[in-house]
Amino acid sequence: MELESKYGTVKISRNIIAKTAALAALDCYGLVGMARKSLGFVVLLKNEHGAKGVKIAEKKDGIVINLYVIFEFGVRLQTVAENVIESVRYQVEKTTGVKVKQINVYVESVRI
């Protein structure tokens, strides 16, 4: 990703955006962690590897963020997902200056 300013060009890697999104998501109540599928099983990622549960796609008018998450049992999934989306959008746009077009939350599992 490249951002143009009057001072020059800033290049931001997808990994930085993914880490920012993962950290913002992990701060939300009701989220146990980020997830990744491995050999058909859902694996809970530790905080330092949370970015592996985030996929970034570039579009003309912004980026699309796909979050693969594990929620806490007993929470209202829709409410937690909306909070995650708002938090991630705010943090990514504030931190990187990149416009977020869309955020998709994929609930891979629920844990007690």
Image (cartoon, rainbow, N blue to C red):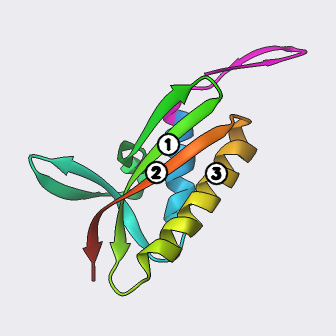
Residue 111 occupies quadrant? bottom left
As drawn, the residue found furthest toward the right would be 6
Residue 106 lies in magenta, yes or no? Answer: no
x and y percent of residue 29 in the render? 52, 76
Q: First in sequence: mark 1 or mark 2?
A: 1
Residue 4 lies in magenta, yes or no? Answer: yes
Q: Residues within 10 Å of mark 1 (few under 14, many from 20)?
A: many
The secondary element bearing badge 2 is classed as strand
What residue is disc 2 on?
104
Q: Residues within 10 Å of mark 2 (few under 14, many from 20)?
A: some
Residue extent of the magenta highlight: 1-15
Q: Amino acid at mark 1?
A: Ile
The C terminus is located in which quarter?
A: bottom left
Q: What number of labels is visible?
A: 3
Residue drawn at x 44%, y 82% is 76
Residue 73 occupies quadrant? bottom left
What residue is disc 1 on?
65
